[in-house]
């Protein structure tokens, strides 16, 4: 056996596992890896401008592929910058592996340069956090990381890689590719679920989350449509089934359709597939309560640890999402009748997601009304466009009015982190060169990772940015107006000229401040490639798609 450096062994193992892309801000602590990547053309290295962007891109890549998004950052400041993305991957159940260059083994525990106890730092927000001290064991650690990140409820793994360990030249046995270990659903349990459906008067499904896939989206949509089961998406899992599916009922989360909420309350049978029924989806554990008296809960999840963790499940089913949905789709039972509620719920959602012009307030019409702008986007952009966003009320217009295609078409953090949209859009436009990628951002949200415009330019990304500028951290202002009216504190923003900023990165940009100017701006943007930014100059008065500050003050 020939000897290799730790860096080469690591890169070889990534290649074997099928890694084709890694996001990084380089550090001197992992030069041996960077050197090995020089000879690994199969792995596309995306060099970013801040580790927050690195980790969000890796998360987005993991969401799109179902394989771990891979990232390399340096110790101390690099690791702490990247930690926000590890938290997203944890809450969003995204497979991710973050490698962190660490200081030499002999110097550990002296609080050396940029030293942090990395496994301890990441333990509460990673599925597994460890350190590789022996180069000969790199294949074992990386193969295990691949398995841990993808199995059960997917999540992030963090591996610290000491600098001197990566330079060691040792003999190491490569591990073969980790095969997927799909949990086949128990046919008896699926039959029991179908029996419950036969007895139900008002079933509702809530779908999307851990381990969801295009295959699961396809089969669940077929099954639910065939039997007329109203299917809601969990918070920010709006691509769990194509929204064109005739029983798609809308998303739960912030600002949901009250009719959908009522339908969930009235359901006698809830079939929850993939979702963990988190705080946002369940409106603070109130829409569906953990004990859900009067409702039967079938909870289908890929991880046994999630079943019964918060919610009591009358019928828990541990299964791979794709296999479960496929088994449902292939099941034929003549006794299972079709519910009318599915199509009724879909009609209600169609009406809910149809933007009406915002009513005048105090005789004043809204100059730039975002609802009709989203409708213009729906009419002009391809139906399978990938919509990416971070956190802020601005996202509510797209969550309500955009019609999502089947997964992957939505990259949005269920953990509600700002600054996610642009890095996610960069990752999406590199992964899907042939698809339209849109980043929707608030002015606060955008500048949290605006530096990744440089990464977009360097990687010749085609992406469209819709920047909703209300000169405010508007969401927090909304909470302020409700709880402490007329006492604005720390929420006003002084912004740069966003259009000029995009142009400085080689992009095209236009500012619009009237609804009627949005469609021509979009036409102009669509004629071009590269970075395109439509800067929407809006009024903080329109604080969400349902509320104005005036209304909050008079409430
Ligand atoms: C990383 C991070 N920091 C802070 C917050 C708290 N937060 C939620 S929304 C928001 C304001 C977002 O402002 P903007 O992007 O301008 O959108 P708007 O609310 O005005 O629509 C803040 C500060 C958060 N969710 N994530």
Image (spheres, rainbow, N blue to C red):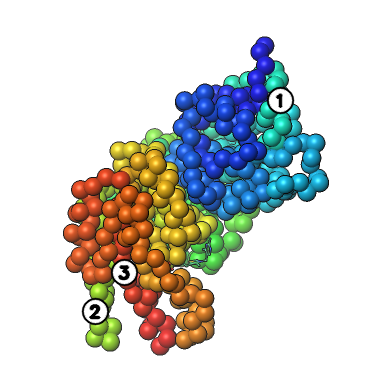
Going from N to C along the chain, the mark reached first, 1 or 2, is: 1
Q: Residue at x 59, y 61 (%)?
A: 291
Left or right: where 474 falls relative to 345: right
Q: Which residue is mark 3?
A: 537
Residue beneath label 1, please? 168
The residue labelled by disc 2 is 365
Residue that appears at 81% across and 46% down: 110
Q: Is residue 370 above or below residue 154?
A: below
> Badges 3 and 2: C-beta atoms under 8 Å apart?
no
Q: Look at the image and tell me in which quarter the C terminus lies.
A: bottom left
Distance from Cα at disc 3 to Cα at disc 1? 56 Å
Q: Considering only order in the chain, which callout, 2 or 3, is on the residue closer to the N terminus?
A: 2
Secondary structure found at label 1: loop
Q: Nearer the viewer, mark 3 or mark 2?
A: 3
**Residue 129 appears left or right of 153:** right
Of pointers 3 and 1, the one earlier in the residue sequence: 1
Q: Nearer the viewer, residue 356 or 131?
A: 131
| Quarter in which the N terminus is drawn | top right
Alpha-carbon neighbours of circle 1 within 10 Å: few (<14), some, or many (≥20)? some
Image x and y of residue 101, in percent: 65, 39
Secondary structure beneath disc 2? loop
Residue at the (39%, 81%) spot, across then down? 549
Alpha carbon distance from label 3 to label 2? 15 Å
Q: Residue at x 50, y 85 (%)?
A: 487
* Crowding near the residue tagged with mark 2, few <14, some 14–19, many ≥20 C-alpha atoms within 10 Å: few
Q: Nearer the viewer, residue 374 or 500?
A: 500
Q: Circles 1 and 2: CB distance less than 8 Å?
A: no
> Residue 10 or 506: which is nearer the viewer?
506
């Amino acid at each position: 056996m020939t000897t290799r450096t730790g860096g080469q062994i690591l890169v070889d193992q990534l290649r074997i596992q099928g890694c084709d892309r890694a996001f990084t801000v380089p550090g001197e602590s992992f030069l041996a890896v960077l050197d090995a990547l020089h000879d690994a053309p199969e792995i596309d290295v995306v060099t970013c401008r801040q580790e927050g962007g690195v980790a969000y891109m890796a998360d987005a890549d993991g969401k799109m592929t179902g394989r771990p998004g891979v990232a390399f950052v340096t110790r101390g400041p690099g690791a702490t910058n990247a930690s926000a993305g590890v938290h997203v991957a944890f809450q969003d159940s995204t497979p991710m592996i973050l490698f962190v260059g660490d200081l030499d083994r002999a110097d550990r525990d002296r609080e050396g340069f940029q030293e942090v106890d990395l496994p301890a730092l990441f333990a509460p927000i990673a599925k597994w956090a460890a350190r590789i001290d022996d180069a000969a064991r790199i294949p074992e650690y990386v193969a295990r990381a691949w398995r841990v990140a993808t199995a059960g409820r997917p999540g992030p793994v963090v591996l610290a890689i000491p600098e001197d360990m990566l330079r060691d030249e040792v003999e190491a046995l490569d591990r073969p590719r980790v095969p997927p270990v799909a949990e086949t659903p128990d046919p008896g349990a699926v039959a029991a679920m179908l029996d419950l459906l036969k007895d139900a008067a008002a079933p509702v499904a809530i779908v999307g989350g851990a381990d969801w896939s295009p295959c699961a989206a396809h089969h669940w949509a077929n099954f639910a449509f065939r039997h007329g089961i109203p299917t809601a998406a969990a918070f920010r899992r709006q691509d769990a089934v194509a929204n064109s599916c005739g029983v798609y009922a809308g998303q739960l989360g912030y600002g949901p359709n009250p009719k959908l909420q009522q339908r969930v309350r009235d359901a006698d049978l809830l079939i929850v597939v993939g979702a963990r029924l988190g705080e946002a989806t369940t409106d603070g554990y109130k829409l569906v309560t953990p004990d859900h008296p009067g409702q039967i809960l079938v909870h289908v999840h890929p991880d046994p640890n999630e079943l019964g963790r918060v919610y009591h499940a009358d019928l828990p089913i541990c299964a791979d999402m794709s296999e479960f949905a496929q088994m449902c789709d292939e099941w034929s039972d003549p006794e299972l009748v079709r519910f009318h509620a599915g199509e009724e719920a879909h009609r209600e959602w169609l009406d809910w997601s149809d933007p009406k012009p915002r009513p005048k307030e105090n005789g004043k019409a809204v100059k730039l009304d975002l609802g009709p702008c989203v409708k213009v986007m729906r009419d002009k952009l391809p139906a399978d466009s990938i919509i990416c966003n971070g956190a802020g009320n601005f996202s509510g217009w797209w969550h309500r009015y955009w019609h999502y295609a089947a997964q992957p078409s939505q990259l949005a953090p269920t953990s509600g982190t700002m600054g996610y949209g642009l890095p996610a859009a960069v990752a999406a436009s590199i992964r899907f060169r042939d698809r339209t990628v849109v980043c929707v951002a608030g002015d606060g949200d955008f500048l949290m990772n605006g530096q990744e415009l440089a990464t977009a330019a360097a990687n010749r990304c085609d992406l469209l940015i819709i920047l909703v500028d209300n000169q405010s951290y508007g969401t927090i202002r909304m909470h302020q107006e409700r709880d402490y009216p007329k006492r604005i504190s720390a929420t006003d923003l002084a912004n740069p000229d966003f259009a000029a900023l995009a142009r400085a990165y080689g992009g095209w940009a236009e500012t619009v401040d009237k609804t009627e100017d949005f469609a021509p701006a979009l036409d102009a943007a669509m004629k071009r490639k590269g970075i395109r930014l439509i800067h929407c100059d809006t009024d903080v008065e329109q604080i969400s798609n349902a509320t104005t500050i005036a209304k909050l003050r008079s409430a």
